[in-house]
């Protein structure tokens, strides 16, 4: 847990990773067959969830990360401190080499500091850990 989090209903990092793995089961990914789950923790300590939601008009579909963070913001959260992501081919375990796409990194940068944590679940109960700043060192900003 990061210093800025207030320790109320607390979802541990391990819980976020497990939830991200589980959320793959509800992904709507009939076009790519690539299912992704995402569980993020906001400053309040509460967690919010997402999965990828594809559409027959392909560009209309959205990634799991943006669904999870959008849910947090819709619940009044202002800052996301951690996000766990699990994604891979539908019938396989999570691909440990996944990183959020560029659009999601920019989306995350609106609500996460550079030291915000991004966990990527792998196929054997492990994970990789990055900071958002490592994955997106130079986010677009209208003003500094
Ligand atoms: N996808 C995500 O949900 N998150 C990522 O980090 C990468 C890609 C989704 C989009 C699409 O539904 C499918 O995975 C294949 O690109």
Image (cartoon, helix red, strand yellow):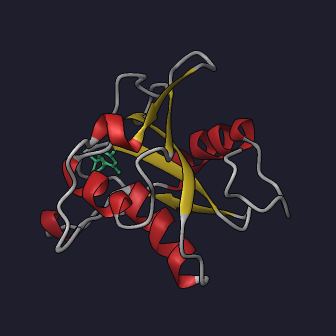
- Depicted 82 relative to depicted 74: above or below: above
- Depicted 15 relative to depicted 45: above or below: above
> In this view of the protein, can residue 134 be seen by the observer?
yes
Residue furthest toward the front? 144
Q: Left of 123 or right of it: where is 139?
A: left
Camera-side residue of 10 and 133: 133
Looking at the rendered structure, the number of numbered marks drawn on it comes to 0
Residue at image point 66% right, 64% down: 43
Camera-side residue of 2 and 120: 2
Q: Position of residue 12 (x, y in %)?
A: 76, 43
Residue at image point 26% right, 58% down: 106
Residue at image point 53% right, 74% down: 71
Camera-side residue of 52 and 84: 84
Q: Position of residue 82 (x, y in %)?
A: 57, 49
> Which image quarter holds the C terminus?
bottom left
- Depicted 56 relative to depicted 97: above or below: below
Quarter assignment of residue 54: bottom left
């Amino acid at each position: 847990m990061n210093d800025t989090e207030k320790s109320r209903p607390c979802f541990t990092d391990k819980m976020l990773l497990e939830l991200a793995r589980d959320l793959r089961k509800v992904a709507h990914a009939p076009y790519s067959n690539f299912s992704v789950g995402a569980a993020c923790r906001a400053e309040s300590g509460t967690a919010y969830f997402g999965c990828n939601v594809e559409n027959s008009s392909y560009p209309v579909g959205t990634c799991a990360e943006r669904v999870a963070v959008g849910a947090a913001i819709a619940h009044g959260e202002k800052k996301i401190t951690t996000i766990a992501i699990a994604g891979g081919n539908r019938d396989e375990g999570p691909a440990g080499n996944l990183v959020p796409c560029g659009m999601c990194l920019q989306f995350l940068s609106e609500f996460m500091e550079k030291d915000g944590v991004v966990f990527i679940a792998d196929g054997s109960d492990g994970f990789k850990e990055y900071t958002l700043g490592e994955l997106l060192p130079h986010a677009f900003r209208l003003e500094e």
